[in-house]
Image (cartoon, rainbow, N blue to C red):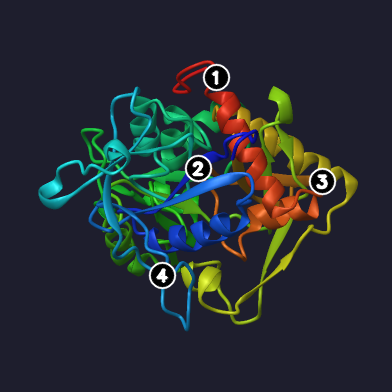
Amino acid sequence: MSGQARKLRVAVVFGGRSAEHAISCVSAGSVLAALDPDRYDVVPVGITREGGWVLADAGQRLAIAGGELPEVIGGTPVTLVGDPGGRGLGVLGAGGALAAVEGGLVGIDVVFPVLHGAYGEDGTMQGLLEMSGLPYVGSGVFASAASMDKEFTKKLLAAAGLPQGDHVVLRDATGALCADPAVLDEAARERLGLPVFVKPSRAGSSIGITKVTDWAQFPEAVATAAAVDGKVVVEAAVPGREIECGVLAGPDGGPPEASLPAEIRLKPGTDWYDFDAKYLEDAVEFDVPADLTPGQLRLVQETATRAYLAMDCQGLARVDFFLGTGPGGEDRLVINEVNTMPGFTPISMFPRMWAASGVTYPELVDRLVAAALAGSAGGSRTGR
């Protein structure tokens, strides 16, 4: 290595305690394969469903095989060093004590937290990395937490004048968050109409979501959502095409850039884009890029960038839309969600949209790592 620059050591963190554990593993498998070994020393760090951190074994399966979802199992136990001077992972020996391996420390330059859902995408991991002084890919604490929570995503988008569908957050008479279906009164039901989608407020990958076509189904749908998250959101169905658009931090600190959008089309017999349709069944078709008019393309890209800025995102985001027709025949674009750590699986829209926009998967991860290092240069990224 004499005369050569030291390679960046990148910790790719995956798995986690959320219901999206398996999808995180699949995303990480793609990211790990895309990181150039000539440029990076890659450290795969799995988090078990129980929350234990491990240096993942070489045999760790990170793909869906025969319909079986992957899971973090095995590996050398480690812990994140909370002291910013440590900047790395402590290797744990017997009884949980730091082991005398490289001084008990695996040094890390930057973290790529490929974590979806709670305890990863919701600001908790970002706060932990801030405390540890480690640069990381993606948005900071605030944007991660607000974008993960559908209620507060909607509030921030509304404050920025961005379009969204009608919805209700279930609350009891005291204003406390509540998963009691009785709090959705007749007036709200009439305003929302049918069908509605009942969702956990803080979850992804369509986990815990039910499409309700009869109000008799509503209590069970609320119970399903509440089993994932105690806050439940009820959304009116929005007619229109399902369009997604990726946003990346601009190179060299420039303004964010929007990808060519994609469209998700359900095959006949598929009712809606649920977990099975996303990951386990051949139930959807993807148009990458989407077939849009120049005006529609401009509208989607501009709105995606505005949403990214409104949520104070950093590094990357995927913005999901419904594109329909307004009462006057005009294009009507409605934001569904903002994802601060979108899927990176082989079928995920975010890398596919950027590939269609001229940014290959390896180039994409390079840009994200560079943005993480640039974003950390000024210190904490919890706010601007």
Discs 4/1, front? 4
Q: Amino acid at mark 3?
A: Leu
In contact (CB < 8 Å): disc 4 and disc 1: no
Query: Nearest the camera: 164 or 119?
Result: 119
Q: Quadrant of residue 259?
A: top right
Residue 289's spot in the image, x, y percent?
79, 57
CA–CA distance in space, label 2 to label 4: 19 Å
Vertical arrangement, residue 348 with respect to residue 319, above or below: below
Q: Amino acid at mark 4?
A: Gly
On the rendered structure, is 32 left or right of 295? left
CA–CA distance in space, label 1 to label 2: 17 Å
On the rendered structure, is 133 left or right of 181? right
CA–CA distance in space, label 3 to label 2: 35 Å
According to the picture, the residue beneath numbered tag 2 turns out to be: 10
Discs 1/2, front? 2
Density class for disc 1 (Cα within 10 Å; few <14, some 14-19, many ≥20) is few
Q: Amino acid at mark 1?
A: Ala
Discs 1/3, front? 1
Precedes in sequence: disc 3 or disc 2 = 2
According to the picture, the residue beneath numbered tag 3 turns out to be: 297
Density class for disc 3 (Cα within 10 Å; few <14, some 14-19, many ≥20) is some
Precedes in sequence: disc 4 or disc 1 = 4
Discs 3/4, front? 4
Density class for disc 4 (Cα within 10 Å; few <14, some 14-19, many ≥20) is few
Query: Nearest the camera: 45 or 70?
Result: 45
